[in-house]
């Protein structure tokens, strides 16, 4: 089973590998810079080489780069679109330098342009990218508050269909649940996976952000809980972890650090749930 967490790159991107190993993970995710500001990745070649070497020697991977929270692919505003495309180009280039196969991105919000225009904007923005060979952009599901897109499986399918790029998908269990797809029982998980397969296709599912939810299904509230201790609960989390069609999909945790528990506790919990 591939399971890991979103690790910090403080002090050097290679530190994320050591932290992942210490937490008991064997794959994971990073930001290349603070996600709350427009900032370029600042990773030197020597630092990148250490990351690549440590990951290879310890069989840690695949890794995912999560794009900046400021990126909005759906925006109708030219200046924000330009910044978003520029930021994403730098992320896919950083992924290439680090031998990271995936860059994860939220579609963003259409801010009044409408769903169809928002989806068109996202697909055409992604089409502007020069994505290096060996790197794939993953469109992430969203909890769906306001005019944000990606809460409906159809949104993900439409962007994949409208874009000329070879895109794939990352599903976040907390987001999917908040968006109204029940995951709190084995039957519900099987129904949701079957619907995703019908609408998008499981062949496009390359990563799962495995998070429990502090809020009920359909609330559009995105707040993560420890594995098994939110409204998805042990039964739902276990059903995701043990679903035969998801067995080989890397699981990346973005669970909280609270109650004296962090990534190590949650990764161990996932391993306990795996049958």
Image (cartoon, rainbow, N blue to C red):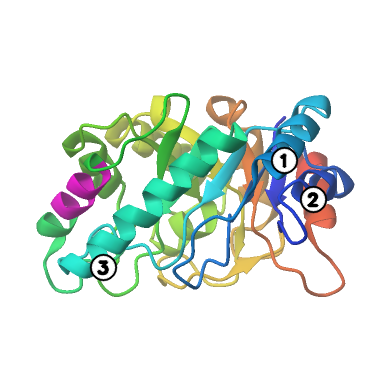
Could you tell me how far apart the alpha carbons at marks 2 and 1 are, in whole angstroms?
13 Å
Q: Are marks 3 and 2 in contact (CB under 8 Å)?
A: no
Rate crowding at label 3 as few (under 14), some (14 to 19) or many (20 or more) other CA atoms within 10 Å.
Answer: some
In-image side of 67 versus 239 (left or right): left
The first of marks 2 and 1 along the sequence is 2
Instruction: Pick the quarter of the image with the C terminus.
Output: top right
Residue that numbered label 3 is attached to: 80
Residue 30, above or below 76 = above
Q: Residue at x 29, y 41 (%)?
A: 129
Circle 2: element type: helix
Residue 82 appears in the rendering = yes
Residue that numbered label 1 is attached to: 46
Quadrant in which residue 167 is drawn: top left
The first of marks 3 and 2 along the sequence is 2
From the top left corner, tell me how far across and down residue 260 is, in percent.
Answer: 87, 72
In-image side of 255 versus 260 (left or right): left
From the top left corner, tell me how far across and down residue 209 is, in percent.
Answer: 57, 49
Quadrant in which residue 126 is drawn: top left
Q: Is residue 122 magenta?
A: yes
Q: Which residues are magenta?
A: 119-126
Residue that numbered label 2 is attached to: 15
Q: Residue 196 versus residue 184: which sits nearer the camera?
A: 196
In-image side of 14 versus 32 (left or right): right
Q: Main secondary structure of the magenta part?
A: helix
Residue 173, above or below 196 = below
Could you tell me how far apart the alpha carbons at marks 3 and 1 are, in whole angstroms?
33 Å
Residue 148, above or below 59 = below
Q: Residue 129 versus residue 275: which sits nearer the camera?
A: 129
Could you tell me how far apart the alpha carbons at marks 3 and 2 are, in whole angstroms?
32 Å
In-image side of 53 versus 111 (left or right): right
Q: Residue at x 11, y 68 (%)?
A: 113
From the top left corner, tell me how far across and down residue 64 is, in percent.
Answer: 57, 42
């Amino acid at each position: 089973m591939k399971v890991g967490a979103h690790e910090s790159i403080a002090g050097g991107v290679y530190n994320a590998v050591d932290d992942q190993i210490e937490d008991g993970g064997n794959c994971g995710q990073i930001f290349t810079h603070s996600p709350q500001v427009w900032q370029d990745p600042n990773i030197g070649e020597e630092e990148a080489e250490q990351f690549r070497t440590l990951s290879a020697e310890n069989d840690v991977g695949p890794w995912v780069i999560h794009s900046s929270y400021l990126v909005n692919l759906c925006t109708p505003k030219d200046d924000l679109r330009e910044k978003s495309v520029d930021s994403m180009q730098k992320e896919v280039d950083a992924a290439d330098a680090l031998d990271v196969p995936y860059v994860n991105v939220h579609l963003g919000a259409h801010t009044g342009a409408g769903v169809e225009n928002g989806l068109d904007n996202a697909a055409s923005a992604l089409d502007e990218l020069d994505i290096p060979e060996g790197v794939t952009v993953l469109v992430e599901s969203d909890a769906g508050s306001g005019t944000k897109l990606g809460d409906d499986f159809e949104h993900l399918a439409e962007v994949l269909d409208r874009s000329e790029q070879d895109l794939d998908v990352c599903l976040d269990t907390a987001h999917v649940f908040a968006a109204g797809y029940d995951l709190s029982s084995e039957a519900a998980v099987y129904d949701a996976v079957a619907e995703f397969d019908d609408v998008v296709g499981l062949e496009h599912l390359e990563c799962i952000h495995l998070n429990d939810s502090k809020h009920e299904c359909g609330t559009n509230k995105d707040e993560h809980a420890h594995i098994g201790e939110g409204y998805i609960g042990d039964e739902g989390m276990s059903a995701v972890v043990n679903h035969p069609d998801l067995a080989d999909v890397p699981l990346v945790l973005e669970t909280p650090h609270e109650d004296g528990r962090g990534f190590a506790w949650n990764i161990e919990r996932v391993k306990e749930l795996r049958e």
